[in-house]
Image (spheres, rainbow, N blue to C red):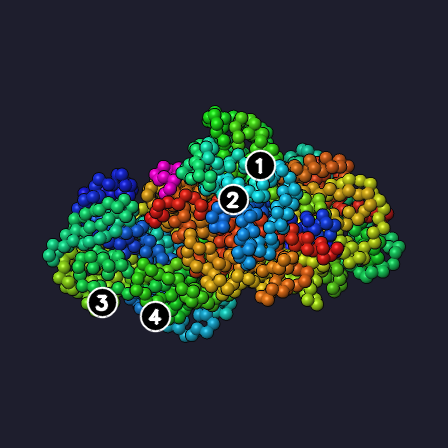
Amino acid sequence: MPRAGKDARVPDKIGGFVRKLAVDVVVVGGGSTGAGVVRDVAMRGYSTVLLDRADLGQGTTARFHGLLHSGGRYVVSDPLSATECADENAILTRIQASAIERTGGYFVTAPGDDPAFADKFLAGAAATRVPAREISVGEALKAEPRLNPGILRAIEVQDGSVDGWQLVWGAARSAINHGAQILTYHKVTKIERDANRVTGVRCVDLKTGEEVQIDCGFVLNCAGPWAGQIAAMADCEPVDVIPGRGIMIAMNHRLVNRVINRCIYPADGDILVPVHTVSIIGTTDVKVEDPDNLAIPHEEVQEMLDAGEILIPGFRQARAVHAWAGARPLIKDSRVAAADTRHMSRGMAVIDHTTRDGLDGLLTIGGGKLTTYRLMAEHIVDAMCTKLGEKRACHTADEVIPGSESGKTYVVTHRLEAREHDRTEDQIICECELMSRKMFTDALAEQPRGSFDDLRRQLRLGMGPCQGGFCSLRATALALEADHIDVERASGLMKLFLKNRWIGLWPILYGDQVRQTALDNWIFQGTLDVEHLPQPEQEVEL
Amino acid sequence: MSRVVVIGAGIAGLTAAIRLARAGLAVTLVSKGVGGLQLSQGTVDVFGYDPVRVTHPLEALDVRAAADPKHPYASIGREAVESGVAYLADLVGPDLLVGDPAANLNLPTAVGAVRPTCLAQPSMLAGACVDGASFVIVGLRRLKDFPAHLIAANLARTVLPDGGRLQARHLVIDVPARDGEIDSSGLTYARAFDDPGFRKRFAAALLPLLTHGDSVGLPAVLGLHDLQAWRKLSDALGHPVFEIPLPPPAVPGLRLNETLLTAARTAGVRLVQGNRVVSARVTEGRVAAVTVAQAGAAREYPAEAFVLASGGFESGALAMDSYGTLTETIFGLPLAGQDAGELVHGDYWGAQQPLFAVGVGVEASMRPVDAAGAPVYPNLYAAGGILAGAYRWSEKSGEGIAVGSAVKAADAIVRELA
Amino acid sequence: MTSDGLEFAGHQFARASLDHCVKCTICETACPVAAVTPLFTGPKFVGPQAERFRNGESVDHSLDYCSSCGTCTLVCPQGVQIAELNSQARAVMKSDHMPVRDQLISRTTLMGMAMTPVAPLANAALHVKPIRTVVEKVFGIHRDAPMPTARTQTLHGWLKKRPAPKKAPTRGTVVFFHGCAGGYFEVETSKKSIEVLEHLGYRVIVPKQGCCGLAQQSNGLFDAATASVLQLCDDLRSAGKGLTIVSSSGSCTGMLKHEAHEIMGVTDDRLKDVAVRIRDMMEFLRDLHEAGELPTDFRPIEMTVPYHAPCQLKSQGMGQPAVEVLRLIPGLTVVESGATCCGIAGTYGLKKEKYEIAQAVGKPLFDMVKATNPDLALCDTETCRWQIAQSSGVPTEHPIWMIHRAYGLS
């Protein structure tokens, strides 16, 4: 089969072979589960292709708070998960260091919380092998001076933060090195079957409109909250997916440098995570119908701000820069009962369509946690091997992922240090996030058809306080200069980028962000008159 | 002691302060920092879209004022706008602002849109987008905020307001503004263009790339202090040259700002910069003084009349907190425009956000009014971005509202204190 | 290094103000250092932008090119404490490798005390090229940088020896704060200030007083600076409760009014007490005038004189009191420099690697001064006067000298 390298995403180079493909395994869904699975499948020697209707990590995976669990969150409520998290935390920090920051974390008893829970926590941590140590309130406040001085107890754990996009792209690049193909913006339209056996997947390349036919022997449905829709394409009995929507708010800078958790039974708004330059508060949990239509309701924003105020007094005066909602991929299916759940990861559900629908060659996976994505993939691929009657060992915990060879974990000073060294040779395009021109043009060369949001996810373009106010014009200029697109698309991409930034802006439009939005409007509408560029026949959507 | 205190150093505050001082009143202008004028495109907008493109701004604002009593132009009126625009043009002189207040110009922007404005800097005029024009847009490799390719390509695909077309191509040259720098700001280039030696080097690099009939579009960085720098460059090239304004730091805005600041100093305005006005003292229904959060101890500035020219949401003069409560941050004035339903909605390219039309309502002499239409304080006046009722950035009316209201407020104060 | 000052620097007050930044570039356009060298990334970059990437660490060493003149904070319309952020980041950066030079030039009082008894010798040494070359090599102080001239008599020496004031006090008592320079180098400015205050009818108390710690603060020595400023507060408070404190040292006044609090996070009540009571000399006279209590029986002085408002004074946000008071003198035409900064910024322009930048920053001012009056310029702060005098060759005085003359006291 054709090896898929970077150029798998260049239309003129892949057009010839994408039209008809044949692989052993098709993985549907480019979130952390799918990326982990395709890497594992490829590493076990199967030919494989991953399909996603959008970009990698565009769905649930990166719409989270960025927490790399120490396991602390589950020491009381779910001891097995706690141990899994602690083990996987250590493995990921080893194999995917560049995506991870070892921030450390605290579980704090806020005023009004039951101080006795901390005792249960410490006992649970000891029982589950999750490293935890109670420290004095004074020590916690010295290290995190913005923390509520009224906290009653503090327990130190090994929480970290993780960049979901780096994580997924790292896994995908590793998979590519093992021969996998990654096809983003490929929407699955049909899972083909020959009587009781899966034979292939049909999809459409959304950027070109081209139909693609992929013959395969096995499909792993890792589509998360969309898994029900995918299973339906194989004419299976309806899979009952109940997406659980949670909102997150990114604050303009690191109000804390460690993950701060409430030391209570897991609840809404009890985590504040420093990720890159921002700190993220999360989250809520509300059952919704449609994972493609996730609201960021006013009441939930208020709930998060109130929760933030408990951890960090003055939280409401701090600047929020962006909000988003993600959907947890919960499957509530009465027939979920994989033969041997002992080997399954906690919180994960596998639907075996052989027993359920009489269809061989399809497994649907729901649930799961980002921290344990590698372990989940291992279990899923084990399950597939078992069904195929083969024994191929998993090595995903042993091999370091491309980009993390140095073993150095991320530190927030990285880009500042890098720009200190190259700023006289290169321009800074996104000043808020210190993204250089070369970073942008390199990413663009890798994804010439990418939207600015696709590039943003890897570069943090426009993710700082000005939310694209100063950088999107520069990005547009560079995209046009790179000669992959015409002026209509370039102008359209700029408008699309601003529109998408706005989706996460309006729910938190208060305080300092109102000033920023007003200035951005003065620039784009006032000075540039962007809204009076020639109207395209159709607005750019991808 | 000053007789009038003006709060805010943007175009409205500066214009009001100068007009008051020239009328013989002792004026103190207090501001937190530098005003927003230098962030602007450096032209004078009066009325550009309503929502279709406006050709005759004074006539159009009359029509709009009649139809929309909540629009600032309804209280300011055409006469004050005309008078304000003429006053400003006279203040800064023809080296900085030219044009006919009765007719809009159509000038290219830094994305290649064709933007209406009323008065422009003379360095911009050769960029008038009219049928048959032939532009070459010249980018500078080290200046990242001027996308020459995008500008030229967008202009070339545009049907112009006069129904015609223009030709536009682009090129990019690399003439460093100073050694050891690849990421130069527009201001660094503007300082370089003040230098005849740099202009000579620049012209020598550009001239061989031009062809007969080209009008040369450049980023608006052609000189900061030397207001003839663009003309000298044009002479050296033997081609018409025009400036296209950039996002901040915006050199044309800087030129206007510096010129007005000098005029204010010359007129004897006492400028107090660096601290926010935090509150007001009211005695017997009148504003007696405003308090400035000065280093060390707060300081009161008493006066007989006050002009609130503190700007809009961009400057923090108007604010919305995390609960959605809106305030005018100095006097706590009643705010108009809050009854527009949902103030913030999720549609970026659709309707404007009603939030940004919230502000202070005023009566005919620019005194803020309460819900019943009565002046809140007999000696408090408002001008510029604080006024309710307009989406300035989309209708292109910012400077017209600012100078119209500034002149009207100043004249009312002069009458009152005479 | 884990001092309270530095911990504060890591994460407080000023850091919170970065939330107000809308990236508008106004600070960049006003920065006098970025205007003359690409070595400095500019206030927006090193301030609110870089701060988001710091985690108690300063990896961007180019931030040391910031002169701490404070112009960025002054011009920011949004209230971002840009200069303060930079000063704090620098303090964190330097905490483990402070050059000897920065420690030396920060100890203002010590330098003055050491030099006074041997003034002629010290002066000779400071103005002899080969010696300055050695000083440059060893300590990194540029050989052409302005250095104070040591006096044979300190202010307190003069106070002890002078006859009692002729006029009996009619207006009550003020405390005079002279600052280190005013005690040892700029003794004449202190004398004239005291004489003007006494002429106006005040009883003037000059308590024994140490250094405000400003030079230590601007070189990142927060612990030492905090100790200094609090000791000084004790000194000044010892003169009496609730008395107005008047100072002819503009920069030290700024340290007491706001910088010790805003940059180093000093929240001590003693500092607050001094901060609300202290007035710059010219501010004090301006306030008297505003209240209608300043005698304006000035002798005419037919002269055109350039006046430069120092950054330290501008950042106190009180307008330009010196200009307002000087303009009351008949015949005197005061021309404002319009320049942002003279370049010296305390001790910045002394340093070998910053000297050329500081000279370039000050050039428009030096040219303006020379063109306006080659014989005299006015400026409120000591190091700025030394810089202007050294680089333009124009003798430069504190504005109080002109007031002193106009009242017929000299």
> Label 2 lies in what chain?
B
Mark 1 surroundings within 10 Å by alpha-carbon count, few (fewer than 14), some (14 through 19), many (20 or more): many
What residue do we see at 34% from left, 39% from top? A484
Q: Residue at x 68, y 49 (%)?
A: B19
Residue B55 is marked as 2
- SS for dot 4: loop
Q: Quadrant of residue B199?
A: top right
The disc at residue A76 is 4
Quarter-wise, where is residue B260 in the image? top right
Q: Residue furthest right?
A: C166
Q: CA distance from mark 2 to mark 3?
A: 65 Å
Residue A325 coordinates in the image, percent (x, y)? 37, 60
Tell me the SS state at disc 1: helix
Q: Nearer the viewer, residue B308 or A536?
A: A536
Q: Nearer the viewer, mark 1 or mark 2?
A: 2
User: Which of the two marks, 4 or 1, is nearer to us in this view?
Assistant: 1
Q: Amino acid at mark 2?
A: Thr
Magenta stretch, residue numbers: A480-489
In contact (CB < 8 Å): disc 1 and disc 3? no
Q: Quote the CA–CA distance across marks 2 and 4.
A: 71 Å
Q: Which mark is residue B122?
A: 1
